[in-house]
Amino acid sequence: MRPGCCGSAGSWRQCCTRSAHRLPRVRVHFAPDPGLNCRVTPRERRILIVAILSSFVAFLDGSIVNVALPAISRELGGGLTLQQWVVDGYLLSLGALILVAGSLSDTFGRVRVLRVGLIWFGVTSLACAVAPWGAALVVARILQGAAAALLVPSSLALITSTFTGPAQGRAIGAWTGWTGIAGIAGPILGGVLVDTSSWRLVFAINVLPIAATLIVLAGVREPERTGPTARIDVAGACLAVVGLGGPVFALIEQGRLGWGSPIVYLPLIVGLLSLAAFLWWEARAPHPMMPLGLFRARNFWAGNLATVGIYGALSLGFFIFAVYLQQVGGLSATSAGLAGIPATLMMLFFSTLFGGLAARFGPRLFMTLGPIVAGSGFLLLTLAVPPVDVWRTVIPGIAVVGLGLSITVAPLTGAVLGSIHPEQAGIGSAINNAVSRVAGLIMIALAGTIAGEQLGVAGFQRVLVVTAALMFAGALVSWLGIRTPKSMTDAGTPAAGEHT
């Protein structure tokens, strides 16, 4: 999670157009490996480090910029509109291109796409750092988001093509815990850099982890493919970009311009028509970038449906939490970031454990209990009324939320992607990422409607109740829809690619 980027100026409804950081997406691929032990080879360790570092860069940048927004506005001007686009320009291109990036990963190879994405991300980070005016910064952020879209699916697919069975569950759990730190470390690190130096370092600092990742990546060979190389679905890629980008743009701008503006409703209409055309084309294309046959796997469609509720809740709950602590609770941006540390610690300590348990016993129980625990934590946060007692009302609730996330995250994406073929890991991860981001954008766009024009205690509590309800809905979908593969119940570990 990250602190809100809204100051006291501007309406609450305008503030709600900004998006919140998403937790990293993970998967556990169920596959038998009778000879598996707990030891990790040097090659596996290197690949895990690469996956963590490359994803960490993308997730960190999604959260670190928030605390720099006031300083950016003071130097470059532009007010609230510039602040919105500095955040949302990145998320717009990231969300719109994530499916294309997954397809590229499956076609050209994970290592190659990761290397291109890292170099591109480094160049665009420096462009952000030296931007002389607001428009240049926004353009650089849009290009930076496109680079980030190349990193996440490729890093996850690299793990799933290297690890199998319970070892993969532990690897994904470690990836989840360490990359999850970016959501909390970002605001804290950003606050220090802005207070002690310049907002430009918030972007320039990306060069350090990128250089380290490229050095480690140099020793990683592309995993051998076990199937034919996929072809790029150019028509599908274009329709996907417009189909996702149009509605996302409309959701961002409607808070400022209203639904009656042609700048809002025209992109929305074009985007929805393009999305419908995308689905029509994918059902007929000889080499579709999103094989609709993936949704014949029960755990894939049920898990993605659960993702809508769970990640919509996370985006809405984390956003309202951070903004409320600052605008109503009176905490600074850095203090609001520090308040989220218990959630990070929970994920760091327990994600690997629950990832391994889900790989061993199946994801259904964890996907049911985890959202219930997280939803209960959000309900506990409704007790945080002014004067906010951080230790008595904030820390306990956010710790419970973190525990719920630790139980949920790895099993959730494991269930979604565990039944598809490893060669489709990139596009499968991209689909799940796209689902989570669109769900989050929709819920954040509705935050102003739920909370009211000006955020107060009553509005904060209403939003958290809705957040908890979404979590509980995700738990219900998981219990009713997710199935443990039959071979797991019979032999302890299911076959790879099993559909239920």
Image (spheres, rainbow, N blue to C red):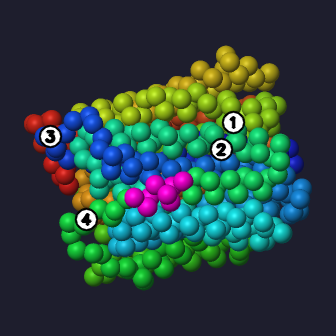
Q: Kindly state the secondary structure of the residue where label 1 is placed.
A: helix
Q: Quadrant of residue 99?
A: bottom left
> In the displayed structure, would residue 371 be above or below residue 239?
above
* Residue that appears at 79% across and 53% down: 199
Answer with mark 1 or mark 3, whichever residue precedes in sequence.
3
Callout in the foreground (2, 1): 2
Q: Residue 8: x, y in percent?
A: 85, 44
Q: Residue 497: x, y in percent?
A: 20, 55
For this view, does 68 lie left or right of residue 344?
Answer: right
CB atoms of marks 1 and 3 within 8 Å: no
Answer with mark 2 or mark 3, whichever residue precedes in sequence.
3
Q: Amino acid at mark 2?
A: Gly
Task: Measure the alpha-carbon separation of dots 2 and 1.
Answer: 8 Å
Identify the residue at the far top of this view.
392
Q: Quadrant of residue 428?
A: bottom left
Task: Measure the alpha-carbon separation of dots 4 and 3.
Answer: 21 Å
Task: Measure the alpha-carbon separation of dots 4 and 1.
Answer: 42 Å
Task: Measure the alpha-carbon separation of dots 2 and 3.
Answer: 40 Å
Q: Nearer the viewer, residue 469 or 143?
A: 143
Over which residues does the magenta segment extend? 212-219
User: Which residue was labeled with disc 1?
Assistant: 337
User: Which residue was labeled with disc 4?
Assistant: 224
Q: Kindly state the secondary structure of the residue where label 2 is placed.
A: helix
User: Which residue was labeled with disc 3?
Assistant: 35
CB atoms of marks 2 and 1 within 8 Å: yes
Q: Kindly state the secondary structure of the residue where label 3 is placed.
A: loop
Q: Nearer the viewer, residue 205 or 394?
A: 205
Q: What's the mark number on residue 186?
A: 2
Q: Kindly state the secondary structure of the residue where label 4 is placed.
A: loop
Answer with mark 4 or mark 2, whichever residue precedes in sequence.
2
